Image: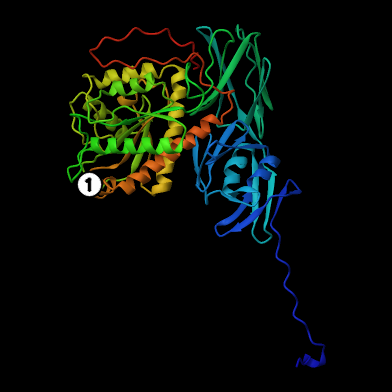
Amino acid sequence: MLVAAQGGPAQTPAAPPPAARPSVVLEGREINVPVTLAGNGPMFGLTPLAEALGGTLSTDVSGESVSLKIADKEVVIGQGNAIITVGDAIVSLSQPPVQGEGGLQVPLDFLRKTFGDLLGYSFDWRPETQRLTIARRGTRELPVALDVVHLQGMTTIVLQFPEEPRYKVNRQGSIIQVQMLADRLTPPAPKEIQDPLVQGVTIDPGQIRVQLAEGAQAESYVLEKPFRLVFDVHRTSEVEVPTSPSAPAGRQAGIHTIVIDPGHGGTEVGAIGPSGIQEKELTLQLARELEAKLAQRLPVRVVLTRTEDANLPLDMRTAIANQNKADLFVSIHLNSSLGSGAYGTETYFLSPQATDTRASSSAATENRAAAGSAPATSDAASSANPANPANPADDTQDLQLILWDLAQTHHMTESQRFANMIQGELNEMLKLKDRGVKQAPFRVLMGATMPAVLVELGFISNPDEEKKLKDPAYREQLVDALSRAIAHYKALVENQPQSQPAAPGTAPQATPPAAGTPAPAAKPPAKVGRPA
């Protein structure tokens, strides 16, 4: 029986307020977006957000990855994978995108690292009200430098920025418009342009407008550090334009042929583990297993540079890739260290300048080993296969010649992007020590006319890693990570718009000859401008 205190009426306990309904508000207007309150934070339906914020979603043929186009950037998402790519960058998320109400659902940091960074939106999530508020951030003021160079029948326009702008490229007839999405430009002093292929370039705070001459067309691509948006302009009838950034003239667009290179072979055994197993044995085993996995997973043709224990010169390996018109080249190696404690994976792409002194030493060791003059004791690339004697200094000179044209520089950019995907998958799936993506002048990568990487899949000198590398189940994990990275890169390339092909005029270059051997007759140079 309730008795009123002090003679007052009995009080009924107040009902708790109803739970707040999750909501999404875009610039003061609520939009219908499914929200799931997960243990690691809220997840948001991507499809309605892409429609509201200005993105285009598509799914690759295999259904394993989703591509989100935001302005001129491609975001590739693997369902159930907490790693995405935003353009060339590998980005880690707090939790993986998953299928849910309204299709694919993504975490808050996905929105901030895509729509936020690329379009200038802010995303404010308030747990107490379960509301996501989306608003435009303030605009940045960015200076831009303009260079126009005409060389060998082609004009190259270079727009250089101190950091990557938020922009979109629109094309209509002979007019190219670079529209700023969330930034304002500080135009440079007006520059008179007297060029046979470009009538004029005007820069306003909100856009850059390029007027091409009649009968001219342009392809665009991006170079980093510093950020440069490059347009190569040529006469329509002069150049057969490739249709993919990884496909030189004569190749179909997309990733159709992959060449896998098992490092070492024959008398060049590579590094030797504590139990006596040789690197050349494991690299061939891994290559065969990767070949089988790719055949099972993707509609691609896979070629191995060697299928048995045989000598194969370094220069011949990329020559095989070029002859097969490969779209990707992957050289598989195992690391070695003088100490037994080093472990983890690392991925290299070709560059005339090494990332650091250790990467430089690794490349020098591998290149010298190719001439049979160095043991396999490098902390990274352990050793290489025998080739005709070569001077490392000559190798660097050859490499600088190969990388001189912007066309080859574009292959280097794609190689870096591919290397990032491989390293990201290895780190994410196997939780291995991240030794990072590095660049160095490895001879085994020289001469490749496609994106090419060298992958070190562990330290054979480490007893624990050697034991794992001999385990088929562990090798299956390594191979699965590599195949996922290749599938991811394939989806990225094939979902790119065909308005951004590789620099025109690209033709397969001859593999650089080893020192002391006569060079083959050179083809005419590609018609590629070289901006300063």
Residue drawn 57% across the image and 46% down it: 110
Q: Nearer the viewer, residue 500 or 193?
A: 500
**Colour pattern of the rendering:** rainbow
Dividing the picture into quadrants, the one containing residue 521 is: top left
Residue drawn 36% across the image and 47% down it: 432
Q: Nearer the viewer, residue 314 or 320?
A: 320
The N terminus - image quarter: bottom right
Can I make out residue 36 in this image? yes
Residue 133 spot, x, y in % from top left: 69, 50
Residue 18 spot, x, y in % from top left: 73, 67
Can I make out residue 421 in this image? no
Residue drawn 66% across the image and 49% down it: 102
Dot 1: what SS? loop
Q: Is residue 323 above or below residue 275?
A: above
Number of residue marks: 1
Residue 496 spot, x, y in % from top left: 56, 29
- 199 displayed left or right of 163: right
Residue drawn 78% across the image and 84% down it: 11
Dividing the picture into quadrants, the one containing residue 399 is: top left
Dividing the picture into quadrants, the one containing residue 212 is: top right
Q: Is residue 174 above or below residue 26?
A: above
Residue 158 spot, x, y in % from top left: 55, 19
Disc 1: CA contacts within 10 A as few (<14), some (14-19) or many (>=20): some
- 89 displayed left or right of 142: left
- 285 displayed left or right of 524: left
Single out the residue that lies furthest toward the front.
Answer: 296
Look at label 1 and name its amino acid: Ser
**For mark 1, what is the residue?**
340
